[in-house]
Amino acid sequence: MPRLPTPKLPAALQGPPPRPGEENGNVAPADAAKEAGITVVDWVDERTSLSGAARWLMFRKIPKGTNWYYTLGSATLFAFLSQAVTGVFLAMYYRPDAGGGAYESIRHITDQVFLGQFVRGMHLWGASVMVVLVFLHMARTFLFGAYKYPRELNWVIGVVLLILTLVMALTGYLLPFDQRAYWATVVANNITATGPLIGPYLGDFLRAGPEFGATTLSRFYSIHMLVVPGLIAALIGAHLYLVTKLGTTAPPWQKVETRPELNEAEV
């Protein structure tokens, strides 16, 4: 019995034509990887709904006249992340031992550890860079009037971040525990102790005893590695949330478009 031909579907019901490489049921490796990546992203987003938060964070209105001065905050954030990464690397080899172990561990990092001198240099100079960037960022915010309503809380958070950055620089300066670090920290602590009201108590707290020693080094190390970075990370999160929610201000020289006043005859 002769076999009847298969009826041909209309063009509208046939679906899209096969892509190159799919004529025989095969999918190109690049297309397969792309589809797999999209599938993974969709799978994660279906369970976390992160796409909405990402769109809210990335797609927002930027005022006219935005320039490179507005990147000082991002540069400060990058400097903090660089300090965190290099600090973790240094903490793997550092020993907070006032009996000579701290200084010898620094020498070991600098002279024997692979890329140790490079990473230590990044951490050392990165601290100064971060302090400078924080001051420049706050100066830009003040000169542009970005501390005014409704951004007062963000300005207060920025001031606290500046203080924490200086505390982190002070506590980190003692960690090599050489002669320069020791006596410079003694002078800084004596200056702190002369402050009004809480100055003497703060000086005693930082010194952790009648004189500088092993307990002082351990306290500075714990403050430098745990307390201050945690507070800075939390406040940076709050700072970025407020920046995203409230937006950024236009430069002061940018003219604000206003509606012309109507004459009494036109009213």
Image (cartoon, rainbow, N blue to C red):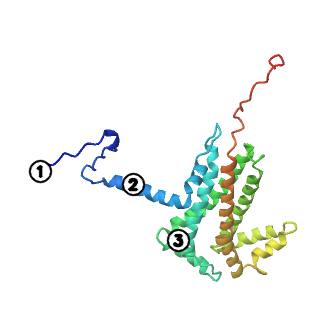
Please tell me whether mark 1 or mark 2 is closer to you in this view.
1
Q: Is residue 91 left or right of residue 242?
A: left
**Residue annotated with mark 3:** 110
SS at mark 3? helix
Residue at left offset 43%, top offset 57%? 39
Q: How crowded is mark 1: few (under 14 residues within 10 Å), some or many (20 or more)?
A: few
Q: Residue 157 versus residue 188: which sits nearer the camera?
A: 157
Q: Residue 218 versus residue 265: which sits nearer the camera?
A: 265
Q: How crowded is mark 2: few (under 14 residues within 10 Å), some or many (20 or more)?
A: few
SS at mark 1? loop
Residue at left offset 77%, top offset 51%? 152
Amino acid under disc 3: Thr
**Residue annotated with mark 1:** 1
Farthest bottom residue in view: 99
Q: Quadrant of the C terminus?
A: top right
Q: In this view, does 48 lie to the left or right of 228?
A: left
| Disc sitting over residue 31 in the figure | none
Amino acid under disc 2: Glu
Q: Against 220, is 256 above or below? A: above
Disc with the residue nearer the chain's start (1 vs 2): 1
User: Spatial distance from mark 3 to mark 2, Cα to Cα?
Assistant: 47 Å
* Image coords of residue 178 (percent x, y): 64, 74
Q: Residue 222 versus residue 37: which sits nearer the camera?
A: 37
User: Spatial distance from mark 1 to mark 2, Cα to Cα?
Assistant: 46 Å
Q: Against 101, is 194 above or below? A: above
Amino acid under disc 1: Met
Residue at left offset 70%, top offset 46%? 140
Marks 3/2 in contact by CB < 8 Å: the verdict is no
